[in-house]
Amino acid sequence: MKSLLVSCLLLMAAPMMGQKSTTQILHRDIQIKTALLPLSEDNKEGAMVYGYDAEGKMTVLRKGTNNLVCIADNPMKDGVSVSCYFSQLDPFMARGRELSAQGKTVAEIREIRGNEIASGALKMPGEPSMLYVYYGKSEDYDPKTGSLENGKFRYVIYTPFATVESTGLPAKPHAPGMPWLMDPGTHRAHIMVGPFN
């Protein structure tokens, strides 16, 4: 009976073992076009863009000439989400991606980056720094054109160590779309605005 059960399980698993990953890495031009969706037209041309190579590894798709960095949609995750941020945030963001690739949890990443910022090993901008996010559902995305219908915007302004007392912002929103301060008093304190539309 046990051998029959094992045989049945192996027969059911065989087709799955032979399957290849269905993850599709889009052409670099489409990745770039989608990554730039959060930005206004006058900022798109000069933004640096990170995306994915044929093996699914993150790489620079385009060097930038302005002060913005954009991240293409992760083909390994469901839905579509792209973001662009002030270039001085890049060391902080890059360190987060590096730690995530090492298998660190969100809590571990926060602790490690917090310790590195406290020691001076990792720098955060001294002034408020912008992050733009545009996201939506996979079924609303056209991989041939790089367009996303029914997407939503979210805006984040990093203000390290800002507090409710130092900004006058609430620690949570009390009306739709209002700005509020998330993680006050920490290295990753930021003003959340949105989502919109």
Image: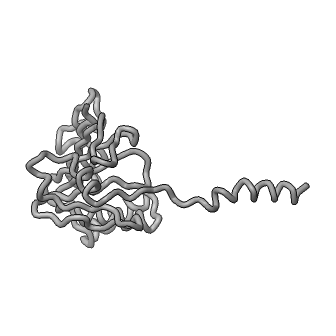
Provide residue 13's location: percent of width, then percent of height: 70, 57
Provide residue 86's location: percent of width, then percent of height: 17, 56
Seen at 35% across and 46% down, the residue is 80
19 to the left or right of 105: right
Seen at 28% across and 71% down, the residue is 119
Q: Nearer the viewer, residue 100 or 116?
A: 100
Q: Nearer the viewer, residue 132 or 17?
A: 17
Q: Nearer the viewer, residue 61 or 30?
A: 30
Instruction: Point out the image quarter for the N terminus.
Output: bottom right
Outermost residue on the top side: it is 175
Provide residue 93's location: percent of width, then percent of height: 28, 61
Q: Look at the picture and state if 176 lies above or below 49.
A: above
Residue 50 image-quadrant placement: bottom left
Q: Nearer the viewer, residue 105 or 163?
A: 105
107 to the left or right of 61: right
Seen at 64% across and 61% down, the residue is 17
Q: Look at the picture and state if 139 lies above or below 30.
A: above
